[in-house]
Every structure is written in C-alpha cells, then in structure tokens.
Amino acid sequence: VPGQGRQFRHPVFFRDVIKAIEQVLENKNTYGKKYTLAAAQAVTYYRYLEIVRTVYNLKYRIVTIPLWGIRILSLFNPLLPEKTKQKIKNASGMMRSFKLDINDAIHDFGYQPAGFEEGLKQLVTETET
C-alpha cells in the first residue's frame, strides 16, 4: 500500500451502474446530463483492503510502503526492468485520492448505490449459492 493507504476511492458495483443506466434511460429529465456514478461513501485504500480481507476471510498482511521510497525508486525509472516500471507507475496512480460527488444522480433519478462492504458481502453470498 503506497503511503499509509489514506487515499480515498469510490468502488462501485456493476449492478448499481446498470440500474443507474436504466433509470437514466427511463427519465427524460436526465437526457443530455452527465452523472458521476460511484459508491455511496468513499473508502480509504487501506480500509478497502481490510474489508476484502475480512469478507473473503483471507489471511494476507497489509504492508505499507513509505511515499519517499516510491519517489526514490521512480528516480531510477530509466534503469529498471519494464515490469518494475509498471508497478511504480501503478503505485504512483494509487497515491491520488478521489472524493466524488454523486448528489446530482441521487437527486435527479434516485441513485442509491451500495456501500462497499455491504455490496461485497452481497456479492459473496450470491456466488456461494
């Protein structure tokens, strides 16, 4: 996990996206507008990994990598193998935090996405049956 994993994400479930598309298509007041579709609440990357570990009953450790370490590695980018370059690029992208506003979707067509933990538990229950 880059840094302390405090970067915010909004993981959204495909069902919520599909339902939102159906609702937009059925509502002429939404035509021509743009909407942000995201999870109900932002979750930090660290918390995201904790939830996945708990819901799936996994035993992995979450290891944090200091940001200064990633920055130092990126200085040597031209000398590194391609796979390592890609991993550094991915880690750099994960250092960005996102807080998205879904209020227009909630107001205009009643968008009600699942929270990450709730949605993941539901997905696990469905795949087990």
Image (cartoon, rainbow, N blue to C red):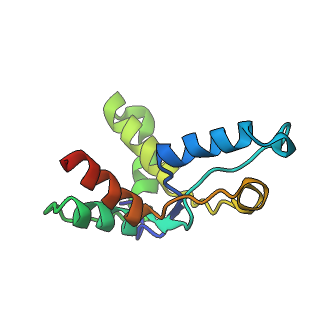
Residue at the far top in the pictured view: 82
**Is 47 placed left or right of 62 in the picture?**
right
Q: Nearer the viewer, residue 23 or 13?
A: 23
Above or below — where is 20 with respect to 110?
Answer: above
Residue 81 in sight in this render: no
Residue at 41% across, 55% down: 70
Q: Nearer the viewer, residue 103 or 23?
A: 23
Residue at the far front in the pictured view: 26
Q: Position of residue 119 (x, y in %)?
A: 40, 58
Q: Position of residue 103 (x, y in %)?
A: 73, 63
Residue at 73% across, 39% down: 26
Residue at the far left in the pictured view: 59
**Is 13 placed left or right of 87 in the picture?**
right
Q: Nearer the viewer, residue 26 or 118?
A: 26
**Is 54 placed left or right of 9 in the picture?**
left
Q: Which quadrant does the N terminus fall into?
A: bottom left
Residue at 66% across, 59% down: 100
Q: Position of residue 81 (x, y in %)?
A: 32, 30
Residue 79 in sight in this render: yes
Above or below — where is 61 with respect to 81?
Answer: below
Q: How many marks?
A: 0
User: In terms of image quadrants, where is residue 101?
Assistant: bottom right
User: In terms of image quadrants, where is residue 31?
Assistant: top right
Residue at 58% across, 44% down: 19
Q: Position of residue 105 (x, y in %)?
A: 72, 55
